[in-house]
Amino acid sequence: MAKVFGRAMLAATLALVAGTGLAQAQVWRSDAGDGTYRNPPLNADYPDPDIIRVGEDFYFASTTFVNAPGLTILHSKDLVNWDIAGHVMPRLTGNPKYDLADGGDYRHGVYAPSLRYHKGRFHIAVTPVGRPTRIYSAADVRGPWTMHELDREAFDPALFIDDDGKAYMATSIGSDGTITLLTLDDDLTTVTSAQKIHYIKGAEGSKLIKRDGWYYIFNSIPRRLGMTVSRARSLTGPWETRDQIDDKTGGHQGALVDLPGGGWYGFVMLDAGAIGRVTNISPVFWQDGWPVWGTPEAPGRVPATAAKPILGKPFVEPPSSDDFGKPTLGRQWQWNHNPDDRRWSLKARPGYLRLKATQAPEFWSARNTLVQKGQGPRSRAVAKVDARGLAVGDACGLGTFGKFSSQIVLTRTAQGHGELGARLIESTQTGPVTTPRGAAVSVPLKDLWLSVEMDFTTDKSALAYSLDGKAWTALPGEFPLAYDWRTGTFQGEQYGLFCYNPKGGEGRLDVDSFTLSKP
């Protein structure tokens, strides 16, 4: 028999769902409220970090691959409490695969951005896979951004502005390990020269900073999940290199950012399992002109907890829950590729997100899957949906999205009845493999509640549904969670709302609310 959950078990979640406004869910709180914090500040997939300071504000650029809008920028006052400021790319351009054409492509797109501030403007260097490097520029970090494409592809570019205002990019690809320095013109639109300056076996993910007359290049060494730092008195060398930390001691790709009152903190990406790659923040001290992660009492290790870099700032977090009552989607949302804007709406039924069924043979090739990051250590999403508009053959619902996509699927049968089922889709190197989980059950096509829980302590997901928002029925079967750089989306597991039909049609799913909370 299916397990039925009591009402008390979901009382907190239902209280959030009720009404027109949704309370913000504090699934993970890094700020302990006593002047300390615990890592990671954001317990979710924010990979390839680059963090800068402008005055008393910190800005964090992170990889988004083919999710749209692309390239997330976050803002903080203390390196611990972060919110999403916006996204650089409203849509991805330069490749039809970003529209899920020609088979689509979940594993490339844009990643490893480099963020800098110069002459009153923000600049981001980023290289879409297989395309020349782009430099985006904006006076306001929230945009709008202008873009200029350079004449070459610089892998994982490290944008750097020297004290005299001259601009450079350092670039290195791990299979080669040669670090090349590109000189840019004053407008950051043209490469004027290129020079090989250093070699580190397996190096990529470069970051370049300057302190007390020394230049420092931080490099990720992915094959051993480690990070190095090199220093020189001149950008052209000679450089000396030391190992820093690795995934056993805190992470393997990042650099340092200075504080308004002096001092430095480190930021570093850690492969954290099914949740993806989280970014840790660490105190740093200096020894003989070299940065050392951690504290003098516990050197060479990112601490699990530490004193906050800056005291007195309020708790802030990215949004997660949404009642779809605003004219635009919440800034936490992204689409699995560039969306087909004809097939979704916040205006057709005010207060609802309408997903019109897109035509696709299966889930992985369907556009307009709306996603947001799974949050650790455990989080639960509840979507209240109106299934009255489903058409025969529609496959619409809520699930996880990643290496394993565990999904609650709603449809209308040929006889006109509602049906609900569970399935597991595994992304493999030969393509997606779909396995039903349990038998489909009849449900009325009316208001329904769908629940997906992610537990990153066990790498398991749990699915359930309710006919009244009070009594819940669990869907049987094993629903794993995983991250695999060879398959999946190259991201941690995400929550996803989807609606498609292999034969097309005019069916729809109206989503009343999405609530994220602790289980």
Image (tube, rainbow, N blue to C red):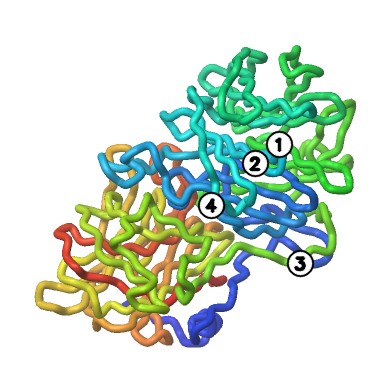
- Residue wearing tag 1: 255
Mark 4 and mark 1 lie on one chain; the one further toward the N terminus is: 4
Instruction: Please tell me which residue is depicted at 18% across the width and 71% down the height of the picture.
Output: 391
Q: Secondary structure at mark 1?
A: strand
The foreground one among 166 and 110 is 166
Q: Secondary structure at mark 4?
A: strand
Q: Nearer the viewer, mark 1 or mark 2?
A: 2
Please report contact status of discs 4 and 2: CB closer than 8 Å, yes or no.
no
The foreground one among 331 and 302 is 331
Task: Give residue 314's mark.
Answer: 3
Report crowding for label 1: few under 14, some 14 to 19, many 20 or more residues within 10 A (C-alpha). Answer: many
Q: Position of residue 453 (x, y in %)?
A: 47, 67
Q: Nearer the viewer, mark 4 or mark 2?
A: 4
The foreground one among 362 and 263 is 263
Mark 2 and mark 3 lie on one chain; the one further toward the N terminus is: 2
Mark 4 and mark 2 lie on one chain; the one further toward the N terminus is: 2
Task: Give residue 87's mark.
Answer: 4
Instruction: Give the residue type that dot 1 points to.
Output: Ala
Q: CA distance from mark 2 to mark 3?
A: 23 Å
Would residue 255 be seen by someone viewing this image from the given angle? yes
Task: Give residue 50's mark.
Answer: 2
Please report contact status of discs 4 and 1: CB closer than 8 Å, yes or no.
no
Q: CA distance from mark 1 to mark 2?
A: 8 Å
Please report contact status of discs 1 and 2: CB closer than 8 Å, yes or no.
yes
Instruction: Give the residue type that dot 3 points to.
Output: Pro
Report crowding for label 3: few under 14, some 14 to 19, many 20 or more residues within 10 A (C-alpha). Answer: few
Instruction: Give the residue type that dot 2 points to.
Output: Asp
Instruction: Give the residue type that dot 4 points to.
Output: His
Q: Nearer the viewer, mark 4 or mark 3?
A: 4
Report crowding for label 4: few under 14, some 14 to 19, many 20 or more residues within 10 A (C-alpha). Answer: many
